Image: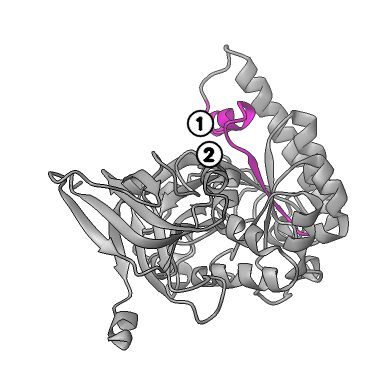
Amino acid sequence: MSKQMLLLKNATIRSMSDALCAQYKANTFEGSILIGNGKILEVAPQITLPSSANCEVMDVNHNLVMPGIIEAHCHMGITEEKKGQEGDDCNETVTPITPMLRAIDAINTMDAAFHDAVQAGITAANIGPGSSNVVGGQFAVVKTSGRRIDDLIVKFPSAMKVAFGENPKVNYAGLDTSPVTRMAIAGMLRNELAKARHYLSNKQEPYSLHYEAWRPVFEQKIPLKAHVHRVDDIFTAIRIAKEFGLRMTLDHCSEGHLIAEELAFEGFPAIVGPDMSSRNKIEVQNVAFKTAGILSKAGVMVSITTDHPVSLIQSLPLCVGLSVKHGLDLEEGYRALTIHAAKICGVADRLGSLEKGKDADIAVFDGNPMEIFTNTLMTIIDGKVVYRNKAVRERRG
């Protein structure tokens, strides 16, 4: 990595940092950001460089500069666009319990969706297996620009995927094997968790990659990532997580608005969506853009998902914008795109806000990214400019 620093000046900075917002008494302020060795070195209204500094200075002309957007739940690079069955590695649909599967072994960074993400100012994504299995495997938070997945990992594993409701039932129906009911899904997950807990507490057990995959879950380093749409499935997921004392995120949470107060009391965060897709299953009949706002107002930490490729990855800011249109507070919309997504994914120590010491993952927009006519002007990942919007620059002369 180059040792040359980069200074973004004349920026309208939306830092998403509570400390900086309190310091400057505003959610946005005019200022500069100094970057070096892939990290943010300073964020301030004025930054004075020593005359000897080896620094590129870039005037962003008072456009909006904010943390790179984070997609908290998707299947980018695992279910590849335009490649059909050959590019679909999302679900191992032959056995319902597969905790040892690792997203990083299936993510193809050459999937066109990665480029689309970068163009939308999305700098990181939480990617993993689908929901056909009761236990799908391990998610990973990765950067969106680069060729070798090993170099893009921010956190692995970042979550353990589990699924309730319609998808596991439909996948295994007619195969003469469980699960074919919601009772079986819950029972199989409990049985798996009990076996994993026994293995992890018994040093005499022979080594098992299958059960070792559960170690960070029981050590509470990562959450269960629960695919839940209906109210009953949401409560079943909560019941099981509490039985075993585990962290969990409620992914999709499509009927969460019907039980918002209860979910706020339970304290599990929600990753809402994809609301831009059709209601093509029975369990998503109550999908609505209002869900995020109702949950947020009740006190639930909320992020938004496209569930790419269910909805396209580049539509993420617009999905949040539609949630704002239907009741989500605007500032909560910005948090859903950045710091809340980072916290929910367990990477807020590196991503989600513009603060000294964090990764220099930055997006520059000519307006609110949640509005349809806003352009991404520049995307920076690890201090490197990975996208510039030449078309906008040429139109403006």
Residue 228 among those drawn in magenta: yes
What secondary structure is found at the residue carrying circle 2? loop
- Residue 41 locus on image (x, y percent): 33, 42
Of residues 163 and 114, which is closer to you in this image? 114
- Side of 234 where 217 appears, left or right: left
Q: Which mark is residue 209?
A: 1
- What count of labels does the image hold? 2
Q: Which mark is residue 100?
A: 2
- Side of 388 where 71 appears, left or right: right
What secondary structure is found at the residue carrying circle 1? helix
State the colouring used for the structure image. one colour
Q: Residue at x 50, y 42 (%)?
A: 347
Kind of residue at badge 2: Met
Circles 2 and 1: CB atoms closer than 8 Å: yes
Nearest to N terminus: mark 2 or mark 1? 2
Residue 108 among those drawn in magenta: no
